[in-house]
Each structure stands twice: as structure tokens, then as C-alpha cells.
């Protein structure tokens, strides 16, 4: 019998971890090749992890809601294949070397302490802990046994915020910024190689943030996706020198043309023709005209992208955003673009996107006009160098120039807000690009056939 390690697969660029949302198989269950074993969620998309072999699930290493790094072993599947003998090297068997009992005992004590500190704090029938107390205990390294020993001054003997902070202060103040973590593998290394010195693995501690609120305030924990999005936004602002250019486009011809053809288009294609695919077509053309907007930055290197892959920011039911990608957008006609936009938007709202459908974007578009905003200053989606915000279409009075003179008329207009990375995109290029988008929109053929 062989033991196969089921690992968390790579979910795409910039995705380093995932949260287990459910196990579809339990220990002892038979699993077939390509059958889903568990479901996971990342900051971008939900997915399933299939088995790469036929066999029986014999061990699970993580529980629901655990966060797992890419490449970590999720479970062990036992197969009927014979396990290869890897214990010999160059025909010789490695004999275990003796280690003093004192060394083993000391390291094992450290392992126990580390495991105890890493155990999540939980309430019991006789002892309830609020989320705030649990968070403080986790941040300060207070174990379950220590917390259970604290005398609570709250209602029914509950441990309050003041109780645990007082305990921490008496315990000896703040902990060092870096704490040693010793795992079972370190114990095994000591047993097998006593001649080597074993140093604990050091991991950085998250900076403690004090929550200040009055008695009437509600404390809401950010969702995992919310935390990751917040991190990405701050990281982008710290990475790119954001500059914005704004321009107003007259989309009266597009408004009237869409109104004229949308019913027949829906009847013929079975798709609702929105403004988004029309705008996406113009943006893809402008990127083809200005390829240095279709780049990414890696350190001091610029990567000029061959394909034009448009990211399309879509809002989710929980208020977060996801960015599905329209691959090779410049090669699609309006019908193809409409089908792609509608399909990705619908599956984004129902959480049915595949991992590769949110990867590989080279430029991003966000429609702030959906929420009534006339313009915005969007944050660049790293490692791209530009993002365009589409404002709301408004009916406004405007000066109309004709061969017979100027006059005031009612026109449909919108603002385009272009954010770009001033490290590699100067004001001329940033302005020329968004001007090209405006020109394509205003030059729309009112008699265009689909």
C-alpha cells in the first residue's frame, strides 16, 4: 500500500493561501481519480480540490475554516500501489544515532508549549469567553489553561477585557516581537542528527491593535476576503505612484444606438446588451494603440504584455469586489464581448468563477457609475499599471458644434477617470490613452450593424 499526499494546489498568481470551507470526504471514504475531496475559498474565488489518485482517505490534517498555504499537505490517501523504498541511499542504510535523553526531553517540552500556545481559545459549558477576550489571548500568547485560571470579575464570573489585560501586565508585560516556534519535525531532526545544532524557526508577530469603542458601538470583525482586499489596496498605494487623468465623453450616439438595437439583439442572441461590452471594446482598441499601457512592473523591469486581457471589476453580494478577466479582448467582436461580459458577471455574482478566470489580467476597468458616482480615483490592480473608472451616464445641456454654428442641446455624457502608475507611465501617455478611449466612444457609428 502507498500513501499519497494531497496538497493544496497553486491557485494562480498572487494566491498563496486558501481557507477550507468544507470536507466532501471523511476518513475511511473511498475516493476515485479526479473526485472532489474538499472545497476551499481564496480572496478571489471558491474551488474544489480533486484527488489525483484512486484510494481511501486515511488522514486529514486540517479542519473547516483553517487557513492552508499553497503546497501544504491537506490529507493522506492510501492507494493499492506499492510504496517505493526511499530509505536507502547508495546501497547503505542510515542507522539512527544516539541522542541524550535530556536533549530530546527539552525539545519535546518546547513542542508541547508551542502546540498549547497555538491551540485556539474556546468557550466551555462553565466558562464563556467573548470574541474580544479570545482575540487578546491569541495576540498575547495566552493559552487555554492560563485563561481558564484567570478569575473573572464579569457577570457570572466571566473574564472581561480588564481581567485579561491585568493578567498580561502581571505576567511580565509585552512579549518579544519574534517568538520561537518548534515543530515536531525539529524533534525528529534532533533525534536523527544530534551533531547539528537545532535553532527554533522564528516567525514575526502581528502588531497588536487596540479596539476603542463606547458601550453602544458594535464591533464587527472583517471577513477574511475583506482583510485580504484591504491588504492589497494598501500594498498597491505603497507600490505605485498613483496619478489620475479625467476626461468627459459624449456617448449620445451610443445611447441612441443601443436603445434602437437592444430588443432585436436580445431576441437574436439571447443576451442583454449593456453599455459595458461597448466600453470594453473601445478600451481594448485604445490598448492596442498604446501598448505601453498594457504592461506590468517587476522590480526594475517592465514586462510588455502580448495579449490584451481586460479585468472587469464586479461587485459581490457581501459588498466585496472580484475581477474576472476577459482574455484576448481585442480579438472579440461586440457579440462575443457581450457574451463574455454577461457570463463572467453572472457567475461572479453566484460565486461560480474558476481560478483561471480571475488571473492574467493586463488592465482593469471598474464601473463606478453603477452606484451613481460620476467619477472616481480607482486604485491600480497590481502588478498592472492602469485602471479606468467609468462614471454614470448623465443627460446634460452641452454646446454642440455644427457647420452652421454652435447651439445648446441635450446630450448624454460621462466622465472617464484614469489612474496610472507614474513610475512608468508619464502624464502624456496616461492622457493620450484615455483620450483615445473617448475618441472611440464619440466616433460610434449610429448605423452600425451587429
Image (cartoon, helix red, strand yellow):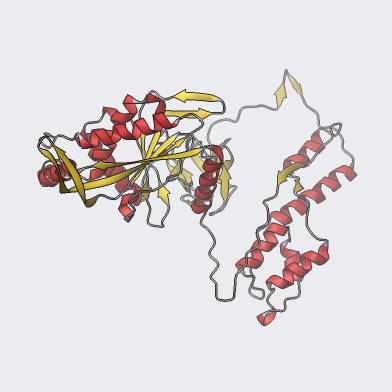
As displayed, is residue 109 above or below residue 329?
A: below
In the rendered image, residue 12, in percent from the top left (x then y), is placed at: 47, 36
Q: Name the residue rendered at 41%, 49% in the picture.
A: 321
Is residue 175 in sight in this rendering?
A: yes
In the rendered image, residue 173, in percent from the top left (x then y), is placed at: 80, 60
As displayed, is residue 167 above or below residue 310?
A: below
In the rendered image, residue 174, in percent from the top left (x then y), is placed at: 78, 58
In the rendered image, residue 423, in percent from the top left (x then y), is placed at: 51, 31
Return the residue found at the far bottom: 156
As displayed, is residue 297 above or below residue 46?
A: above
Answer with the quarter of the image where residue 134 lies. bottom right
Is residue 281 in sight in this rendering?
A: no
As displayed, is residue 426 above or below residue 256?
A: above
Specify whether 224 is left or right of 445.
Answer: right
Q: Name the residue rendered at 51%, 56% in the picture.
A: 223
Return the residue found at the far front: 405
Q: Name the residue rendered at 51%, 46% in the picture.
A: 233
Camera-nearest residue between 352 and 365:
365
Camera-nearest residue between 108 and 430:
430
Answer with the quarter of the image where residue 128 lies. bottom right
Camera-nearest residue between 347 and 48:
347
Look at the image and tell me in which quarter the N terminus lies.
top right
Look at the image and tell me in which quarter the C terminus lies.
top left
Q: Name the residue rendered at 42%, 36% in the picture.
A: 386
Amino acid at each position: 500500500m502507498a500513501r499519497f499526499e494531497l496538497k493544496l494546489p497553486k491557485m494562480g498568481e498572487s494566491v498563496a493561501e486558501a481557507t477550507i470551507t468544507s470536507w466532501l470526504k471523511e476518513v475511511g471514504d473511498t475516493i476515485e481519480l479526479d473526485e472532489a475531496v474538499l472545497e476551499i475559498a481564496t480572496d478571489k474565488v471558491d474551488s474544489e480540490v480533486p484527488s489525483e489518485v484512486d484510494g481511501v482517505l486515511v488522514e486529514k490534517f486540517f479542519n473547516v475554516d483553517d487557513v492552508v498555504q499553497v503546497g501544504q499537505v491537506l490529507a493522506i490517501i492510501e492507494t493499492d500501489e506499492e510504496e517505493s523504498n526511499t530509505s536507502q541511499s547508495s546501497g547503505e542504510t542510515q542507522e539512527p544515532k544516539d541522542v541524550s535523553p535530556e536533549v530530546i526531553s527539552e525539545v519535546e517540552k518546547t513542542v508541547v508549549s508551542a502546540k498549547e500556545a497555538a491551540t485556539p481559545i474556546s468557550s466551555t459549558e462553565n466558562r464563556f469567553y467573548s470574541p474580544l477576550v479570545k482575540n487578546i489571548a491569541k495576540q498575547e500568547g495566552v493559552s487555554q489553561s492560563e485563561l481558564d485560571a484567570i478569575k473573572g470579575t464579569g457577570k457570572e464570573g466571566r473574564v472581561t477585557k480588564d481581567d485579561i489585560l491585568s493578567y498580561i501586565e502581571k505576567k511580565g508585560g509585552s512579549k518579544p516581537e519574534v517568538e520561537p516556534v518548534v515543530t515536531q519535525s525539529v524533534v525528529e531532526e534532533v533525534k536523527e542528527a544530534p551533531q547539528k545544532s537545532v535553532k527554533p524557526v522564528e516567525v514575526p508577530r502581528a502588531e497588536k491593535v487596540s479596539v476603542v469603542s463606547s458601550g453602544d458601538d458594535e464591533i464587527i470583525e472583517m471577513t477574511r476576503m475583506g482583510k485580504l482586499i484591504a491588504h492589497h489596496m494598501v500594498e498597491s498605494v505603497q507600490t505605485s505612484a498613483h496619478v489620475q487623468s479625467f476626461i468627459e465623453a459624449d456617448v449620445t450616439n451610443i445611447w441612441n444606438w443601443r436603445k434602437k438595437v437592444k430588443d432585436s439583439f436580445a431576441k437574436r442572441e439571447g443576451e442583454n446588451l449593456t453599455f459595458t461590452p461597448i466600453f470594453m471594446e473601445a478600451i481594448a482598441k485604445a490598448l492596442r494603440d498604446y501598448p505601453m499601457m498594457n504592461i506590468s512592473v517587476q522590480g526594475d523591469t517592465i514586462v510588455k504584455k502580448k495579449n490584451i486581457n481586460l479585468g472587469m471589476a464586479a461587485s459581490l453580494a457581501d459588498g466585496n469586489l472580484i475581477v474576472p478577466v476577459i482574455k484576448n479582448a481585442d480579438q472579440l467582436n461586440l457579440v462575443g464581448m457581450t457574451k463574455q461580459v454577461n457570463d463572467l458577471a453572472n457567475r461572479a455574482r453566484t460565486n461560480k468563477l474558476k481560478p483561471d478566470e480571475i488571473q492574467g489580467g493586463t488592465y482593469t476597468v471598474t464601473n463606478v457609475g453603477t452606484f451613481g458616482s460620476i467619477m472616481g480615483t480607482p486604485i491600480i490592480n497590481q502588478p498592472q499599471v492602469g485602471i479606468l473608472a467609468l462614471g454614470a451616464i448623465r443627460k446634460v445641456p452641452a454646446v454642440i458644434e455644427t457647420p452652421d454654428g454652435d447651439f445648446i442641446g441635450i446630450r448624454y455624457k460621462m466622465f472617464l477617470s484614469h489612474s496610472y502608475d507614474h513610475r512608468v507611465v508619464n502624464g502624456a501617455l496616461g492622457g493620450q490613452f484615455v483620450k483615445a478611449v473617448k475618441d472611440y466612444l464619440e466616433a460610434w457609428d449610429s448605423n452600425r450593424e451587429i
